[in-house]
Amino acid sequence: MIKKIQEKTGRAWLEINLTNLRHNAQQLQKLMPQGCELMGIVKANAYGHGVKEISKELSRIGIRSFGVATIDEGIAMRKQGIRGDILILGYTDISRTEQLHRYQLIQTVIDYDYACRLNRAAKKAIPVHIKIDTGMHRIGIRAEDEGLVQEIFLLDKLKIEGIFTHLCVADSRRETDISYTQRQIASFYTLLSQLKQLGITLPKIHIQSTYGLLNYPELQCDYARIGIALYGCLSNDKDETRMQPKLKPVMELKSRIALIRDITEGEEVGYGRGYMASRYCKIALLPIGYADGLPRSLSGENARVLIHGQQVPIIGRICMDQLMIDITDVPEVIPGDIVTLIGQDEVDEISAVEVATQAGSITNELLSRLGSRLERIYIK
Ligand SMILES: *Cc1c(COP(=O)(O)O)cnc(C)c1O
């Protein structure tokens, strides 16, 4: 049964704007050189936005490759009818090799030993992309080990469709970080030319994620793996990037006032007596908490929400399922009124990056953790 809008917006919910998603994808595609395709990174439930609707919308505008973190994310997409290439960017246990076949997923080869084990476990050819470590030292075969990479091309059950690397300081405009990134890029291309000299026909290549594209847009690749920018934000508040496409936030987080009460001067509010009223005040309860993904670390950080277009503070500690706000300065508020925790209300706006920064994190973490209990509403 499809839930009615009123039921979905009774407590706390996300409004996901698919028109803005489309806009962002198109802006980002404009930055890419001819021949480079946008790979939509939809891991972690499309950074909390809902993988089914996000992938379907991206498919509608012609995007046909996707990246996920786990095999189960890939399987879920196939079951939801998503076509096109789905690349698993991380580790998949060898016991699940059969499912890679069944759901036509592309696996990342995370090191040489893994390639051999996958090859042994496979009954039919498995499409893979080889990950090359050029300096992040997380997963991948070292770019210097061209002999090992060559051997992977000789394994009979692996069908090598791609080879890629990942940049670890592409967001930084510091000189030392730029030269680190340039060395990463150079060692990747050196490896590729060595492979060519060994007679290997190169598969699809890719390097950039969001910051790679925004700071190094001139790289000639077959794909750019774009996550956070598709959702209309950057990871950090202070990031200055070379390219600055006009991105529109895709997600808004909202809740409704459940009750309003009076607190007199000197009374305390919430766990740990975390807030003491220094004057008579009117406070309101919002039925949303850290179990919904709103970081508890926002407590005491002067975090704000929007109501009737005005900013009011969150007071005391954020609870698992509830939080309190001080509405003394907006006297016309009544129970049922909508409160914006991320998004725009009249002329004021609270951005995801602002909230993430206040919580001591980045938008990638904030967004991907939202929505364990929140309803999602899709808007076009
Ligand atoms: C998550 C991820 C991306 C997307 O990163 P964004 O910064 O969100 O664009 C790209 N590549 C890999 C390997 C990833 O794990």
Image (cartoon, helix red, strand yellow):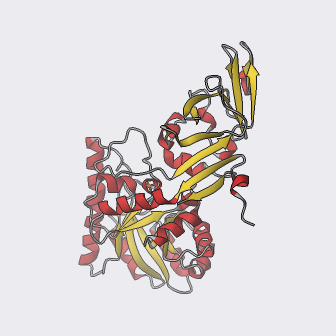
Q: State the residue at coordinates (58%, 40%).
A: 341
Res 177 visible: yes
For the residue pair 152 and 367, the one nearer the viewer reads as 367
Quadrant location, the N terminus: bottom right
Which quadrant of the figure shows ligand 1?
Answer: bottom left
Res 88 visible: no
Name which quarter of the figure residue 379 lies in.
Answer: bottom right
Q: How many marks?
A: 0
For the residue pair 210 and 289, the one nearer the viewer reads as 289
Residue 5 percent location from the top left of the image: 68, 56
Q: Up-down: is 219 above or below 268?
A: below
Is 302 left or right of 210, judged from the image as shown? Answer: right
Q: State the residue at coordinates (42%, 47%).
A: 234
Q: Up-down: is 115 above or below 175?
A: below
Q: Up-down: is 164 above or below 252?
A: below
Residue 177 percent location from the top left of the image: 30, 45
Residue 163 percent location from the top left of the image: 38, 70
For the residue pair 322 and 85, the one nearer the viewer reads as 322
Q: State the residue at coordinates (51%, 67%).
A: 57
Residue 116 percent location from the top left of the image: 49, 75
Is 359 left or right of 323, judged from the image as shown? Answer: left
